[in-house]
Amino acid sequence: MNKVELFFEKVKTIGFWNRLFGWSEMRTLSYEAIEELIRMTKDLEELRSNVAKLEKSEAGMLEKISGLEENVSNAKLNDARRESEWNTDKESLARIQQDRATLTKKLAEFQALEEQKTKTYHKNVEKLNHAYDQLKTEKERLNDARVEEQRLELENMKTTWQQHEKDIEQEIKRLCAKHTITYLDSVPFRGKPDNPVEICEEVIVFDAKSPRGEELGNFPTYIKNQAEQASKYVKHKSVKKEIYLVIPSNTVRVIDKFHYQLGSYDVFVITKDALEPVLLSLKKIEEYEFADKLSPEDRSALCRIIGKFAHTTKRRVQIDQFMANHMLELLRLAESELPEEFVGLMKDFEKAEKLNPSTERRNKEIDISKLSDEHSKINAQAEIRELIVPKSLDDIE
């Protein structure tokens, strides 16, 4: 027990006799306790100073530890980042190696394909050269065939022109028999015009004209000369002052003038298809007792109808001629441009097809009401398909 604790213990237990006879001991003990207390105080101060120093040192250590912990944390983060980057680089390297392997494989395939293409190219060049030789031979053959076809076409045209006068004569006789019109085998004046018919006590001449040679360029001049020479017929009183020159349908394309006004008479250039409407228009005059009693309105109406008949017939012939040439060209193009197997198959289908237009019979009138009904049905079908159909001839430009 130290002196301080002993002193306080003595103080708590001191009695009266001890105070009287043991006071010196108490005083000595107090001095010793005071000295020890002073030492303890100094020791305490030293301990406090040491504690302060230790606390200060601990604070520094704690600060250093915090800094070290932060450095460790940063080091861990850097390490994790480096590890992530390393993994990323590792994956990128793996992808690059995989891409390299793929590209190497594709390069090998491309080289093999390029070699194959080179071989195929050389083979195709050989085939192309062979095909070119065949095409050249075929072109020469087609040119020869076309020349032969043109020659045959020209011969057919010449044959048609040679038969033209007989065909027109037979057609006019047939139409006269059909519509009860008088066909004159002889005329009451000198000379014998082609195909004279009598309507309302007037002789109407339908003179058949066809080209004299192979060159159609001179045919319009020939027609003009024939129109001027027709004056030998109209000088007779019984001959109508309207002469009709009937030409082949396949020559219409070179004709630039279809009506000649030559002083005292007119000449009309028509085709075989126009014979019937012209004859019907002229026959309408017989409904009057005398032709010279026609009113100006009736004459104008009659001329207008004849003009429309003539124009419609000529336009129909021109359109048919154009469409025929166009269709023939399409057929030639199909046979020359399509592959041979297509042409063979096309001809097989062509042989299987059959078109049977309605047959015309003698003594059977073509009913205009039935034609109108059929025309209305066609117009209805055209409207359903949004096709534009002219309502009349005046609507056709």
Image: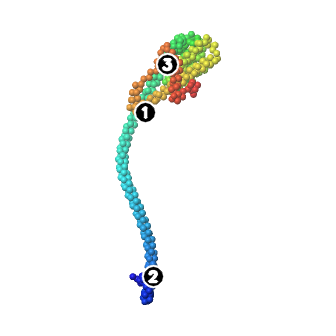
**Residue placed most toward the observer, 139 or 173:** 173
Q: Amino acid at mark 2?
A: Thr
Where does label 3 land, which residue? 164
Residue 205 falls left or right of residue 25: right
Q: Is residue 220 above or below residue 129?
A: above
Please report the residue visible at 40 percent of the width from the left and 25 percent of the height from the top.
352
- Residue at x 41% of width, y 26% of height: 350
Give the SS element for disc 2: helix
Q: Which residue matches tag 2?
A: 41
State whether residue 76 is above or below residue 273: below
| Label 3 close to label 2 by CB (< 8 Å) | no
Say which residue label 1 marks. 337
Which one is nearer the viewer's eye here, 230 or 98?
A: 98
Q: Nearer the viewer, mark 2 or mark 1?
A: 2
Circles 2 and 1: CB atoms closer than 8 Å? no
Query: How far apart in space, not on screen, are marks 3 and 2 (Cα)?
Result: 162 Å
Q: Are marks 1 and 3 in contact (CB under 8 Å)?
A: no
- Residue 155's spot in the image, x, y percent? 45, 23
Question: In this image, 64 relative to 205: left or right?
Answer: left
- The residue sitting at 55% across, 18% down in the picture is 277
Circle 2 residues within 10 Å: few <14, some 14–19, many ≥20: few
Residue kind at label 1, given as amino acid type: Glu
The amino acid on which the numbered mark 3 sits, given as a three-letter code, is: His
Q: Of 373 and 307, which appears nearest the observer?
A: 373
> 73 above or below 17?
above
